[in-house]
Amino acid sequence: MKEFYFEDLTPGLRLPALEHRLTEADIFAFATAYDPQSFHIDPEAAKDSAFGGIIASGVHTYAIAYKLLADTGIFQAALIGGLGADEVRWPAPARPGDLLHLDAEVTEAIPSRSKPDRGVIKTRTALVNQDGTTVVSLIALDMMKKRAV
Amino acid sequence: MKEFYFEDLTPGLRLPALEHRLTEADIFAFATAYDPQSFHIDPEAAKDSAFGGIIASGVHTYAIAYKLLADTGIFQAALIGGLGADEVRWPAPARPGDLLHLDAEVTEAIPSRSKPDRGVIKTRTALVNQDGTTVVSLIALDMMKKRAV
């Protein structure tokens, strides 16, 4: 697998559209632990909710997006650490059975001013379902090593 | 339990400092599913990393923060849906055994312009460990119903 360092993650770089099938069991497991609201874990209550059925916790969709981003391999060789994310949004619900794919592109690469061996990468990251609808979007911020010179 | 509607979530409202003990088992389970990097799941590799030991996935700390926010009860009666979060940051690592507590305050309440029955609440939300160090901070955005008039 290609090794990605700060210098390799240039703005405009598009990442592979990796896929993830969302299962009801995973929605229940995540929501039971971290977001036990009825429209995530109770099929009957969810049917009567504004969503008309079970939907995934928003934080769960963020977690899946981050997993697929890591699965592209861009963090494998040179990640120093995740810094966080900006503008996390859930424009539409994600439902059991959805086939989600990653839509991600490096948008900024900012060399550190204080530490010449590293820099911050911003990656516009989204999950899109089988109908072309985005269910989560965010800008991931990650500190990456530069190549040793 | 008090029922919270949009009108009850006024800027300056501080929420209870609910606690959560972070276990190594939970760190492994979350990271195995969503963030399988060695410093989250491999104690030997983690010892040799810059972190000096196992740390929780950042997305995991966000999930715990959201859970404690929900546990305060503010979403129980009148949540329409989570919209997302701004400025998610992980200023310091969270480690196995950490006792994290919620530090959260409503900072904005914005009535919807198009739908008079609802509005967006912004809640500055953080988890702070036993040493007073913040391990995750974010601004949660949630759409809430107004009281029926």
Image (spheres, coloured by chain):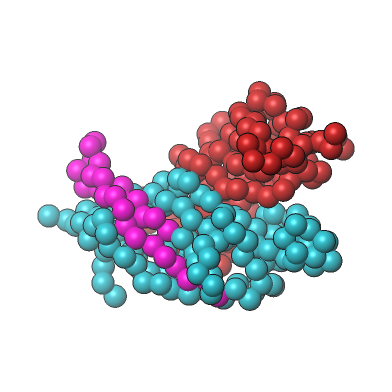
Chain colours: A red, B cyan
For the C terminus of chain A, the image quarter is top right
Which residue of the protein is positioned furthest toward the left in this rendering? B149
Residue drawn at (81%, 36%) of the image: A147
How far from the left and from the top, in percent, is residue A60? 57, 53
Query: As displayed, is residue A92 above or below residue B55?
Result: above
Which of A78 and B16 lies nearest the eye of the viewer? A78
- Residue B60 location (% of width, % of height): 60, 60
Residue A128 horizontal side relative to residue B44, left or right: left
- The answer to whether residue A29 is visible is yes
User: What residue span does the magenta drawing correspond to?
Assistant: B99-125
Say whether residue A69 is visible: no
Residue B109 colored magenta?
Answer: yes
Q: Kindly indicate the quadrant of the structure image that contains residue B98.
A: bottom right
Residue at left offset 27%, top offset 59%: B12
Q: Residue furthest top?
A: A12
Work out whether B36 lies above or below B28.
above
The foreground one among B45 and A130 is B45
